[in-house]
Each structure stands twice: as structure tokens, then as C-alpha cells.
Image (tube, helix red, strand yellow):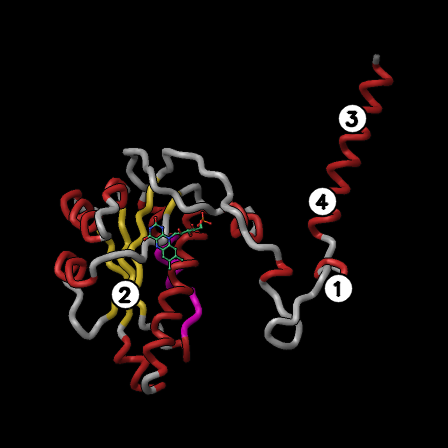
């Protein structure tokens, strides 16, 4: 799967099969987090790997009763050490730590999906409860819980805004009417044309045979 396809087809999955996750895949997923960018390359992200069934159930409960989280075979709890970033960047370090966690989480989700493993970024949790379960000290921050496993559901692509509603040209609020034409970016258009062309050819071939 190429990177763009991986980005576009990843989905949040909330129902998992009772199938163990291979260590080789898990290793690749964890390594993807290690390769994520971080402010000043400070790499303050720490990941707690949870496989114990009771702990997984407790984590599901701490995620404001999202019990499905505990049904995943593996849970990653993504934390950072903001003391490290604050030493270099002052109070801004707290924000950078959160960003560092975000880049690691996204790499985890994509590396998982690339290998056929499903996941979901879970940000709703009772922090103190979660701290106690996985023993995170007060100076460290918990950013995300990521259940990992094999999907037991198929979910459609949720609606996304169009590029016109996401991108402003030069200044806030300045929308581009037809961004594809503006950028001479015909990715989507060309794909549609190719699909239409293929359909015409196969219709023509069918008619010749008949
Ligand atoms: C910061 C953040 C927190 C999230 N927290 C939760 C959560 O607590 N529970 C949940 O089911 N999904 C959570 N999600 C997943 C989103 O609901 C999901 O990404 C969104 O609906 C789009 O679906 P997709 O991931 O399949 O594209 C979270 C996503 C992000 C980025």
C-alpha cells in the first residue's frame, strides 16, 4: 500500500476479533512511533504496551466506559515527558510535547493499517484512573490510548470537508473556489475520467461481442 492510499483508507475501528497480534507487526508499529518527528528531535514520547487482559478491561473502563477498548488484544498508552521539552522551550514545551505525541500516534495508526491491523485514537479518558492503572508519574502527560487488533467490523469513510473548506489562500478566510483548477491538481478528476473511460471501453467490447 502506498502512503497516500494508507492515509485515505485508515479508519477508526471499535470492534475487534479475539485474534492475537503478531509480535513482528507490533514491533513495526512501535518502531513507526520512534521515527515520528519531534520538536528539536527531543523524542520525549514514551509508550506503555499493555497486553494483560485485566489491565485492558480497566483501561476500557477508564476511557469513560468505552469498554470496547479493552477487547483489543493490545493497547498502547502514549505519554510524554514535558519536563524535557520545557527545559528547552519553556512553557511552549508543553504544547510541543502534545504535538510530539500526535505525530507518534498518527505514525502508529498508519503503520498498523499498512499491515492490516486496526486501531482507534482514543482521547477520552479519566486521567487519574489511567495513571494508576499504568503507573504514569505526575510529571508525565498521558495523551492517547490506542487499542490495536484485527477488525470485527467494516466502517464507511466518515464525511470529510472538501479542500475548499479547509484551505485558505494567503490569509484566513480567503477561500479558493476551485482548488483543483487553481493548483492544476487533477488527481481526483483524472481518476474519475479513467474510470469513465474504462467503463466506455468495456461497454463497447460487450456490444461488439453481442
Ligand atoms: C484527539 C482524538 C481523540 C479521539 N477520541 C476518541 C474517543 O475517545 N473515542 C472514540 O471512539 N474515537 C475517538 N477518536 C476517533 C475519532 O472519532 C475518529 O478519528 C473520527 O470519527 C474520524 O473517523 P476515522 O478515524 O475513521 O477517519 C479520537 C480522535 C482523535 C484525533
Label 4 – label 2 distance at C-alpha: 41 Å
Q: CA distance from mark 2 to mark 3?
A: 53 Å
Please provide percent x and percent y for residue 90. Answer: 32, 87
Q: Toward the viewer: 179 or 86?
A: 179
Sequence-wise, which precedes: disc 4 or disc 2?
2
Left or right: residue 182 compared with residue 75:
right
Q: Helix or strand or loop: what does disc 2 sit on? A: strand
Q: Say what secondary structure mark 4 lies in.
A: helix
Q: Mark number for residue 182?
A: 1
Asked whether disc 4 touches disc 3, contact meaning CB atoms under 8 Å apart, the reply is no
Judged by its main secondary structure, the magenta piece is helix
Which residues fall within the magenta stretch?
29-38
Q: CA distance from mark 2 to mark 1?
A: 41 Å
Q: Nearer the viewer, residue 133 or 63?
A: 63
- Which of the two labelled residues, at mark 3 and mark 1, occupies the earlier sequence position? 1
Q: Position of residue 167 (x, y in %)?
A: 61, 66
Residue beneath label 3, please?
Answer: 202
Which residue corresponds to the image point at 33% horizontal and 38% vertical from the top-left?
A: 15
**Residue 115, percent from left and from top:** 44, 44
> SS for tag 1?
helix
Camera-near label (2 vs 1) is 1
Tell whether position 196 is magenta.
no
Q: Earlier in the sequence, mark 4 or mark 3?
A: 4
| Chain-order first, disc 2 or disc 3 | 2
Crowding around mark 1 (Cα neighbors within 10 Å: few <14, some 14 to 19, many 20+) is few
Residue at image position (37%, 49%) is: 120
Disc marking residue 4: none
- The answer to whether the beta carbon of the residue marked 4 is less than 8 Å from any atom of ligand 1 is no
* Of pointers 2 and 1, the one earlier in the residue sequence: 2
Q: Which residue is mark 4?
A: 191
Residue that numbered label 2 is attached to: 79
Amino acid at each position: 500500500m502506498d502512503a497516500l492510499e494508507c492515509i485515505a483508507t485508515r479508519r477508526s475501528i471499535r470492534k475487534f476479533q479475539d485474534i492475537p497480534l503478531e509480535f513482528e507487526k507490533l514491533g513495526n508499529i512501535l518502531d513507526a512511533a520512534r521515527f515520528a518527528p519531534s520538536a528539536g528531535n527531543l523524542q520525549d514520547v514514551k509508550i506503555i504496551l499493555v497486553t494483560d487482559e485485566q489491565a485492558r478491561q480497566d483501561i476500557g473502563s477508564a476511557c469513560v466506559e468505552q469498554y470496547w477498548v479493552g477487547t483489543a488484544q493490545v493497547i498502547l498508552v502514549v505519554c510524554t515527558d514535558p519536563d524535557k521539552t520545557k527545559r528547552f522551550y519553556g512553557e511552549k514545551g508543553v504544547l510541543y510535547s502534545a504535538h510530539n505525541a500526535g505525530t507518534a500516534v498518527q505514525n502508529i495508526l498508519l503503520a498498523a493499517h499498512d499491515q492490516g491491523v486496526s486501531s482507534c485514537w482514543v482521547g477520552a479518558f479519566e486521567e487519574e484512573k489511567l495513571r494508576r492503572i499504568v503507573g504514569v508519574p505526575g510529571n508525565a502527560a498521558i495523551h492517547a490510548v490506542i487499542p490495536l487488533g484485527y477488525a470485527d467490523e467494516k466502517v464507511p469513510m466518515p464525511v470529510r470537508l472538501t479542500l475548499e473548506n479547509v484551505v485558505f489562500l494567503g490569509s484566513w478566510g480567503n477561500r479558493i473556489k476551485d482548488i483543483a483548477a487553481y493548483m492544476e491538481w487533477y488527481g481526483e478528476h483524472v481518476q474519475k475520467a479513467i474510470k469513465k473511460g474504462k467503463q466506455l471501453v468495456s461497454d463497447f467490447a460487450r456490444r461488439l461481442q453481442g
